[in-house]
Amino acid sequence: MTDHLHEYKCEHCGLEMTDTANGILARLTPKYRETNDYISQIHKRRKRRLLKNAS
């Protein structure tokens, strides 16, 4: 997702986890997924803007 946010899925049971703001793993709930998607969009826009300005 980003350099700081990651989502994980267990190959055995399919349980999905994510990093929280304080660095521990938590079950990936719809609220965490929504938050991660929003942060990922911000990260992509900033990265695009930085690449555009560097050219």
Image (cartoon, rainbow, N blue to C red):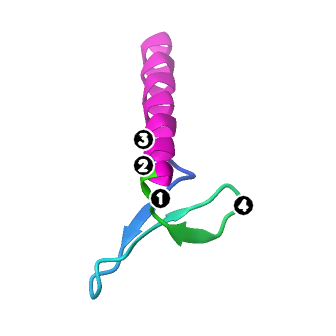
Q: Looking at the magenta stretch, what is its main secondary structure?
A: helix
Q: Which mark is residue 39?
A: none
- Horizontal and vertical percent position of residue 29: 45, 60
Which of the numbered marks, if any, corresponds to residue 22? 4
- Judging by the rendered image, the residue that carries numbered circle 3 is 37
* Quadrant placement of the C terminus: top left
Q: Amino acid at mark 3?
A: Asp
- Residue 47 is left or right of residue 9, and the answer is right
Q: Which residue is painted at 44% across and 43% down in the image?
A: 34
The residue under label 2 is 1
Q: CA distance from mark 1 to mark 4?
A: 13 Å
Sequence order check: which comes first, mark 4 or mark 3?
Answer: 4
**Percent position of residue 47, x then y:** 47, 27
Q: Nearer the viewer, residue 52 or 55?
A: 52
Nearest-to-viewer mark from 4 and 2 = 4
Say which amino acid is labelled 2: Met
Look at 42% across and 53% down and name the residue there. 30
In this picture, residue 3 sits left or right of residue 13: right
For the residue carrying disc 1, how many other residues have a C-alpha within 10 Å: few (<14), some (14-19), or many (20+)?
Answer: few
Residue 52 quadrant: top left
What kind of element bears circle 4? loop
Pick whichever, 15 or 40, lies toward us. 15
Give the farthest residue toward the bottom. 12
Going by the image, does 40 lie left or right of 20?
left
Dot 4 amino acid type: Asn
Point out the tag, 4 or 2, that comes first from the N-terminus.
2
Question: Which residue position is annotated with label 1?
Answer: 6
Kindly indicate whether the residue at mark 3 contacts the one at mark 4 (C-beta within 8 angstroms): no
Question: How dense is the environment of label 4, judged by Cα within 10 Å: few (below 14), some, or many (20 and up)?
Answer: few
Which residues lie in the magenta part?
31-55
Question: Which amino acid, mark 1?
Answer: His
